[in-house]
Image (cartoon, rainbow, N blue to C red):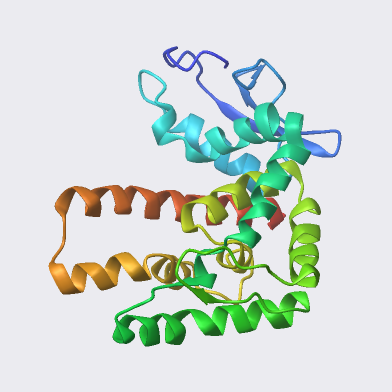
């Protein structure tokens, strides 16, 4: 269905192969994107997840309860239609990566940042052939061309569906290194999220928690985990 405000009219939800992809049908009607394009999913696992969201609808359709469908729609309607622009935007985070810009003080925070973030920069150096450079303060620092090129190549090698997930993983953390790490099974998603929130958590430990900021952070955390799940659905072949 293309109209998000429509109410449930279907009795059954099924997944069917279509070409090299998978489609979801509501009774006999194929699910389409908001732009009325066919919603063709790259893996059976993703199609099953989309089907489960449609099967769970009771009454009106609420897109906020359908994160996999929303991400898949974005991959087809937005990312696939402007792939190079989205990929370039994501790759640009490598030039201003969160992990590279450290506090000027106090020294306790500087040391804590180094202890938390340096291992991820070390991993990036091993994974991409060159380590990003860390600096104190907000003055721009030039990054090694080899590291930037290797990470950019990884971004541009994504499919539109993978790039949709990677966009959120990078934008929500402010770090291309953390975003790319989140696409690896060797890393725990929650641990990566906590690294992206290191400064905020440190400030909260010093000055106390702000309830409104904490609620906003929790929404972002949920979106980060949803993006990690969507990435996994891109790679999982399902049954």
Along the line of sight, which residue is nearer the eye, 13 or 190?
A: 190
Looking at the image, residue 212 lies above or below residue 37: below
Residue 108 in sight from this viewpoint: yes
Rendering quarter of residue 205: bottom left
Residue 238 in sight from this viewpoint: no
Residue at x 54% of width, y 71% of height: 100
Q: Is residue 235 left or right of residue 102?
A: right
Quadrant location, the N terminus: top right
Q: Position of residue 92 (x, y in %)?
A: 66, 53
- Number of callouts in the render? 0
Residue at x 19% of width, y 47% of height: 212
Looking at the image, residue 83 lies above or below residue 125: above
Q: Position of residue 176 (x, y in %)?
A: 61, 61
Looking at the image, residue 167 lies above or below residue 37: below
Q: Position of residue 10 (x, y in %)?
A: 51, 17
Residue at x 44% of width, y 87% of height: 115
Q: Position of residue 208 (x, y in %)?
A: 13, 66
């Amino acid at each position: 269905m293309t109209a998000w405000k429509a109410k449930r009219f279907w009795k059954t939800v099924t997944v069917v192969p279509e070409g090299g992809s998978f489609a979801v049908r509501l009774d006999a009607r194929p699910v389409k994107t908001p732009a009325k394009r066919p919603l063709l999913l790259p893996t059976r696992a993703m199609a099953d997840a989309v089907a489960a969201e449609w099967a769970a609808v009771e009454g009106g359709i609420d897109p906020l309860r359908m994160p996999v469908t929303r991400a898949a729609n974005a991959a087809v309607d937005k990312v696939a239609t402007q792939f190079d622009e989205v990929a370039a935007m994501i790759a640009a985070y490598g030039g201003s990566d969160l992990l590279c810009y450290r506090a000027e003080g106090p020294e306790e925070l500087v040391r804590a940042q180094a202890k938390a973030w340096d291992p991820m920069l070390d991993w990036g150096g091993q994974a991409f052939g060159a380590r990003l450079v860390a600096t104190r303060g907000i003055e721009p620092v030039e990054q090694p061309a080899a590291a930037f090129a290797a990470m950019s190549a990884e971004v541009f090698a994504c499919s539109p569906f993978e790039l949709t997930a990677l966009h959120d993983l990078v934008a929500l953390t402010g770090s291309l290194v953390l975003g790319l790490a989140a696409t690896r099974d060797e890393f725990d998603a929650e641990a990566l999220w906590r690294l992206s929130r290191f400064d905020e958590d440190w400030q909260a430990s010093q000055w106390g928690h702000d309830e409104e900021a904490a609620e906003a952070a929790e929404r972002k955390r949920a979106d980060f985990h949803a993006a990690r799940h969507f990435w996994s659905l891109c790679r999982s072949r399902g049954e």
